[in-house]
Amino acid sequence: MDGRGGRRGPGRRGAVAGALTAALALAVALPCLVPETPAHPGALWETVPPWSAPPVPVAAAAALVRRSLPAGSAALPLLAVRVLGPGPPLVAPDPGAEPNLTVVTHNVDAATSVPAAVSGVLLSAAPDPVAPEEVIRERWEAYDAAPAGPLPYSAREGTAGLWSRHPVVDAAPVDTGTGRARALRAEADGPGGVSAVYVVRPASVRVDASGFDADRRNAAVRALGESIAGEPLERVVFMGDLNASVDDRGLRPPTSRRESARQAGEGLGFSRPAGFPVVRIDHIPTCGAQAVRSWSLPEAGGDHVPVAARLRL
């Protein structure tokens, strides 16, 4: 029937669905348009970018079933954004480079995990340094014992630690403004000379009735960014549970220190929760180093899985 008969033609069906699909396509293509206040919806959206893919077949199927021109027209750019747009913000592995340093980072959740089991998994990657986070004071001795053979050098500040095959000097806490020692900086004398190594775990984020609460984490990340901005060494390896995806705008201060800053990784590399990882919040950004490969280790206890990377310094 025509418009006077009251039945909508194919061109007018699904206008609402088309508008929602178009808005989703725009948010996927330009996440910076999602506002950060109130309640940090932008940061939450940037934390889960891979999960914007499932609406694509749903939107396409809805357009097909409804024979809706607006919905179909909006589904096509959404599909294009997901297929042709930028993938995970990780550096592709370079099989042509010869790595000379293997690093591992892991939030061990020391209150519940078993030190010997955790250390066994972490050492299986034959690492040069290992960065454990969230090690409570009462369990440092147990955690230090297992890797002491292959990784004889160590440092720790609060809940952040470093075990290394190469000598470690000048370890010191990094102020994250939380009143607790959650980060450290040390210098490791490894392949090609001395590198600055940061081990960090800023404050957690929370999703509650008020929204995505990232204020404490963002403040800690800004403080870390200021420390790294003043870093005198050219080569920097930055490891830890950052409580954010590398897409999250709140993470930019430490990861944007130089144009050469790179995020070691390949694929999605989800690291949390350990039983069924759905987001990657454990990272290894570097400056003055080339990422050759990155991968996740088996579950080692706690609520994260360890993340490893092979680098060329």
Image (tube, rainbow, N blue to C red):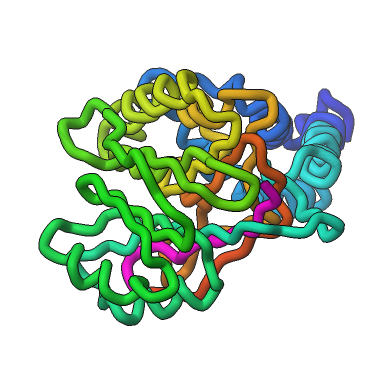
Judging depth in this view, the residue of 8 and 17 nearest the camera is 17
Please identify the quadrant where the N terminus is shown. Answer: top right
Total labels: the figure holds: 0
Left or right of 283 in this view: 162: left
Judging depth in this view, the residue of 23 and 39 nearest the camera is 39
- Percent from the top left, x then y, of residue 162? 37, 54
Give the residue drawn at x 86%, y 57%.
96
- Percent from the top left, x then y, of residue 45? 52, 36
Residue 203 in magenta stretch: no
Q: Which residues are magenta?
A: 301-313
Residue 14 location, quadrant: top right
Give the residue drawn at x 32%, y 63%.
108
Left or right of 272 in this view: 56: right
- Percent from the top left, x then y, of residue 310? 65, 59
Judging depth in this view, the residue of 287 and 86 nearest the camera is 287
**Residue 132 visible to the viewer:** yes
Q: Height in image: 282 above or below 307?
A: above
- Percent from the top left, x then y, of residue 234? 59, 30
Left or right of 139 in this view: 227: right
Residue 262 location, quadrant: top right
Give the residue drawn at x 24%, y 45%.
157
Residue at the left extreme, as displayed? 138
Give the residue drawn at x 52%, y 62%.
128
**Residue 205 visible to the viewer:** no
